Amino acid sequence: MKLVHTRRNVLKFAAASSAVTASTGGLAYPAAAAGSEVVVAELGVLADAPFYIGVEKGYFEKQGIKVVLRRFISGAEVVAPLSSNQLQVGSGGMSAGFVNAFARDWPIRIVLTRVRDVPGNSSQTIIVRDALKGEIKSMADLKGRKVGNNAPGSVMQFMLGRMLELSGLKMSDVTVVNMPWPSMGQALQTGAIDAAVIAEPYVTLLDQKGIAFPLNRAADIIKHPYLESSLVLYNKDWTVKSHAQAEAFTVAYLQGTRDYYQAMKHGPNRGEIIKILQKYTSLKDAALYDKIQWVYMDPNGTIDMKGLAAQQDWFVGQGMAKAKVDLSEAVDTSLVDAAVKRLGKVDAN
């Protein structure tokens, strides 16, 4: 995938996006749960930017939707309330659990891509404790080492496994130690783990503190397809019973995504978007926004089906998922297709 962005193109895109925003009127849509409310799970991270931007800039309100943000500690906590329609919208990475759940006709559908790791915007990273800087210079040097991972069967474990395989190793060549991201810094300092699979801003923060250095980012090794690291999920019952509202929500979400995309590419709205992100996320230091690699968001919300298929194949091959499912039944592209038709397609190449 070739990504070419000039300042001229970013400015042209900003002008076009503003025109579209002005033309999308505020329409009333059928209720999702109660009144016009749509309950959205968020984690206080950069990847949730479209929710925050959409709220702050009134995109959801213009679509007749009141978004209720509910903060969760991890994506795992989102699954149960999203399945039961207590939440209408959530997010998460493709996992072995997802594959197994879809095999049981899980009442959740993948609707948009959330985050993809591409060169220059690759948040997911393998980091190594600083004491090993002279010893570990490539993924192949991780053989026999202890590597921290956030959860078994997660997209991050796929990332680790695939990066090892593409470097001539297997998962069995390392010892995986499962722990939450906030615990990894101390584990690296004490030598409890030698490396970790982690994301921004932890990558930059731990590097600045002299605790760990980035060895390889996902996009350095996983290519064609790139890592589809996170997805936007809708409750299936909501999309059926309140289809027009789900479509309107998707329009507003894409508007927020496109504002983020401009800022990610150093567009004229970067300062405005950083202020919104400072308000809602744990990343409060404005200076860090120019040091981290921002997560990449597709301005058209297009899901890379080859990327999802590669992850499913890996989980099944590892015995973490029981069998492959028909991913076309797990993914509903009708909502994003309708939103793009309404807003116009952005050329991200």
Image (cartoon, rainbow, N blue to C red):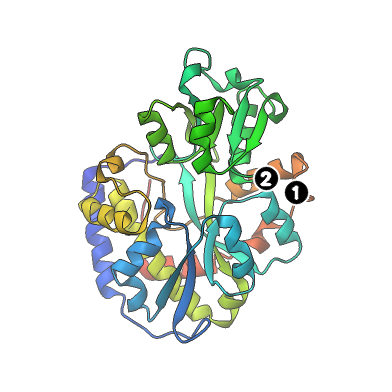
Q: Report if residue 222 is visible in the image.
A: no
Label 2 near label 1: C-beta < 8 Å? yes
Instruction: Specify the label residue 153 is tagged with.
Output: 2
What residue do we see at 59% from left, 34% from top?
A: 148
Where does the image place residue 216, in percent across and percent down from the top left?
49, 28
Residue at numbered disc 1: 321
Q: CA distance from mark 1 to mark 2?
A: 8 Å
For the point 60% across and 75% down, the residue is: 85
Residue situated in front as seen by the camera: 253 or 151: 151
Question: Which of these two is toward me, 70 or 318?
Answer: 70
Q: Position of residue 203 (x, y in %)?
A: 43, 35
Q: Does residue 131 appear left or right of residue 318 in this picture?
A: left
| SS under mark 1 | loop
- The type of residue carrying mark 1 is Ala
Residue at 37% from the left image edge and 54% from the top image edge = 281
Residue placed most toward the observer, 333 or 186: 186
Tell me which corner region of the image, top left, top right, bottom left or bottom right, holds residue 80: bottom right
Question: How many tags in the picture?
Answer: 2
- In the rendered image of this protein, does residue 307 appear above or below residue 169? below
Q: Amino acid at mark 2?
A: Gly
Looking at the picture, does residue 136 appear above or below residue 242?
A: above
Q: Is residue 200 left or right of residue 195?
A: left
Identify the image quadrant of the C terminus: top left
Residue 2, position in %: x, y? 41, 39
Q: Quadrant of residue 122?
A: top left
Name which of mark 1 and mark 2 comes first in the sequence. Answer: 2
Can the viewer see residue 179? yes
Left or right? Give the position of 63 relative to 95: left
Residue 262 percent coordinates (x, y): 29, 52
- What is the crowding at mark 2: few (fewer than 14 residues within 10 Å), some, or many (at least 20)? some
